[in-house]
Image: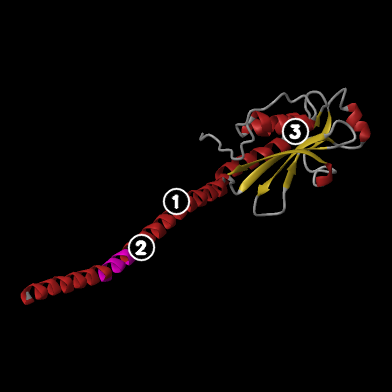
Amino acid sequence: MTSKVDRSGSCILAGLALATMIACIMPQASANEANKRMADASALVSTDTASRAAPQATRRAVARAEKGPYYVDFRARTAASWGHAFVWYGKTSERAVEVAGLTPAGDTWSYVLGYFTWVPSETGASYGDLDPDYLTASYRVYLNEADAKRVFAYIEKLKASSPVWNAETTNCTGFIGDIAEYMGLKVPNRWQRPENFVNSLKEMNGGRQMVRLSAE
C-alpha cells in the first residue's frame, strides 16, 4: 500500500514538473515566434517602401533628363492685326532669352504695304515679345547641348537670311515653321493665325517635350 502511494505521488510530482517545464517553454517560444513575425513584417514593409521609392526616384531622374538644359519656345502673342508668332531660345538655367521672329521693319505703313508686296524685315525681338500679358500660346521643347548648338546656329542663319516680309508668303508663322521643321517636328499649315499655328504645332507633335536631332 505504501509503495503504491509513493509511486502515485512520484507520478504526480513528475507530471507537475513536466507541466511547469511546458509552461516555462511555451511563453518563450511564443515570444520568439512573435519577434520573428515582427522582424519579417518589418523587412517586408522596408522592401515594399524601397520598391515604391525606387521607381519614383527613377521617374524623377528620367523627368530631369528629359528636360534638357536648352530649349526653344514657340510662342504667339496679340497684336494690332492677327497677332505675331516668334520663338524664345536659350538655356534653362538662365533667365535671359534670345528672341527670333519675322516682322516688317518700320511703321504701320510697312505692314500695310506688306500685304501687297515684299517689305524690309526685322528678325529680332519686337514690341510685346517679352511681355507675358500679350501671350496667347506657347509650346516649349527641350534640347541637349549638342543639338541646341545646331538649332541655335540655324536660327541665327535664318535671321540673317530673311531680309523681307510679306503677309501672304514670307510671314512670321512661316519663319518659326522653318525652325520647327529643322528640329524634326511635324509642322501644320503655316497660313493661319499665330495662336492657332502654335497650338496646332503642339497638338500635332503630341506635346512632346524633348527633341533630338538625327545624326548627320
The amino acid marked with disc number 1 is Ser
Give the mark, 3 or 1, whose residue is nearer the N terminus. 1
* Residue identifier under label 3: 162
Q: Is residue 30 magenta?
A: yes
Dot 2 alpha-carbon crowd within 10 angstroms: few under 14, some 14 to 19, many 20 or more = few
Q: Quadrant of residue 191?
A: top right
Picture colour scheme: secondary structure
Q: CA distance from mark 3 to mark 2?
A: 80 Å
User: Circles 3 and 1: CB distance less than 8 Å?
Assistant: no
Q: Is residue 38 magenta?
A: no
Q: Position of residue 128 (x, y in %)?
A: 84, 43
* Residue identifier under label 2: 34
Does residue 213 sit above or below 27 in this rendering?
above
The amino acid marked with disc number 2 is Ala
User: Circles 2 and 1: CB distance less than 8 Å?
Assistant: no
Q: CA distance from mark 3 to mark 1?
A: 55 Å
Magenta range = 24-31
Dot 3 alpha-carbon crowd within 10 angstroms: few under 14, some 14 to 19, many 20 or more = some
| Residue drawn at 49 percent across, 49 percent down | 58
Residue 185: image tag: none
State the SS at label 1.
helix
Residue 51: image tag: 1
Is any atom of residue 75 visible in this view?
A: no
